[in-house]
Image (cartoon, rainbow, N blue to C red):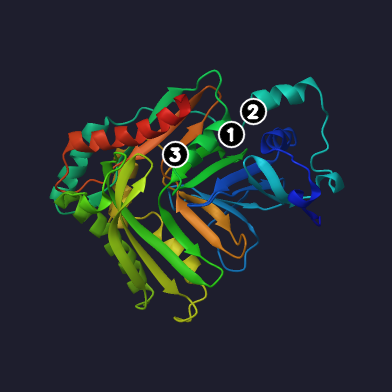
Amino acid sequence: MSIITKDYRRAGEKPFVDELIPKIFQLGGSFMLWRLPASNEKNLIVCNTGGIAQDEITLEGSQSGFAFAPFNPAQRKFFFNADLVFRFKEGEIVEGPDLSDTTYFTTQTGDTDRQEKKHLRYYTSGKESKEMTDFSSLVSECIKTIESGAIEKIVPSKFQDIDLPQDFDLLKTFNRMCDRHPDAFVSLVSSPDTGTWLGASPELLASVDANEKFKTIALAGTQRYEPRMNLKSVAWTQKEIEEQALVSRYIINCFKKIRVREYAEHGPRTVVAGSLLHLRTDYEVDTKEVNFPQLGSVMLKLLHPTSAVCGMPLQPALDFLKTNENYDREFYSGYLGPVNFDNESKLFVNLRCMQLFEKSARIYAGAGVTADSIPEKESEEVEMKINTLSKIINS
């Protein structure tokens, strides 16, 4: 179906996103709503053709859409075609299809519509009863394994279920996350295949811009951020510096595997992510200069899951987590983002995220463990990350 694009600013009409999304649900469609870091524009993809499960995500030459991949690299990833695309600011759609010329949103109106606008429903996936390993005990087991020399770093995680307030509003919560995390990739993904996930990720996994430049970052180390802190004077422990260096080394090793030596490296530097601080190093490759047009897809497969969310070396750390973590992360610490959207692909690690159920939210968090880790400190770190999201839900 051809899509007629309308600029609502010129047309003088002001449809709102909270009026549009309930109609998507009524028609059984899926949607991906996001805001890129340091941007004031929000984008909405509507997919009425259903998610496409595939073994790997390809960035070059694929259709415009949105990728959503689980943590486990052996599991299938989902790709959602951009059947309809909207852009909006301040909640008002400023560009998108001419809705008067499409039957996508021809629905009955009345009390049901008004009720759904007030209490926006969403897709929920099956909620299992899960018994996690005690996190402090898990960290202690990680340290023992690392001290044996088998693994350099492991990133254990946990989740916490919290009740949603009676007046919980999905879109208001998304907007609060945008306000509190201006430099994060804030996303809301909802489909029958995946359930509904909301997050604010500080970590770029892989991007290819319109000039065919590939980018990724190494992000590790965590401290609490206090307003008006001087970032240049922040001190990092040896453990945090080493943890970030391991992530950087992981990326460089991926470049070495495909014999790419011409890359730019900037960092590490201290960055703010909501109420937390991290160490960050940026990497960039000009795919035209190295004559490697498929670099984005190749690096995506090599990078995921990074040592920042799994460990190093990859396979032993992944095997350890499968055996000892005792729950399925699903899409937490997987990746997500727009593909071939405005001639660019930007995929982020699914961190600082929650999975939404009918009356509760499941918040996920993890911490990098090395030989210098202290179980109590790692537990404090994951609690800081969980509290960052729980405060947004209850504010």
Q: Secondary structure at mark 1?
A: helix
Percent across and percent down for residue 56 are 52, 59
Q: Tell which tag, 1 or 2, sits nearer the viewer.
A: 1
Which residue occupies the extreme right position in the image?
101
- Judge from the rendering whether residue 188 lies leftward or rightward of residue 395; answer left or right: right
Position of the N terminus, as image quadrant, is: bottom right
Q: Amino acid at mark 1?
A: Leu
Amino acid identity at mark 2: Leu
Residue 309 visible in the snapshot = no
**CB contact under 8 Å: marks 2 and 3:** no
Of 89 and 101, nearer the camera is 89
Residue 176 located left or right of residue 237? right
**Marks 2 and 3, Cα distance to the nearest angstrom?**
22 Å
Residue, disc 2: 120
Q: Residue at x 42, y 38 (%)?
A: 328
Judging by the rendered image, the residue that carries numbered circle 1 is: 171
Q: Is residue 211 above or below residue 138?
A: below
Sequence-wise, which precedes: disc 1 or disc 2?
A: 2
Q: What element does badge 3 sit on?
A: helix
State the CA–CA distance, disc 1 to disc 2: 8 Å
Question: Alpha-carbon neighbours of circle 1 within 10 Å: few (<14), some, or many (≥20)?
Answer: some
Q: Position of residue 164 (x, y in %)?
A: 50, 22
Residue topped by disc 3: 180
Q: Secondary structure at mark 2?
A: loop
In this view, the residue in front, 172 or 200, is: 172
Contact (CB < 8 A) between labels 1 and 2? yes
Query: Which is nearer the N-term, disc 3 or disc 1?
Result: 1
Which one is earlier in the sequence, the residue at label 2 or at label 3?
2
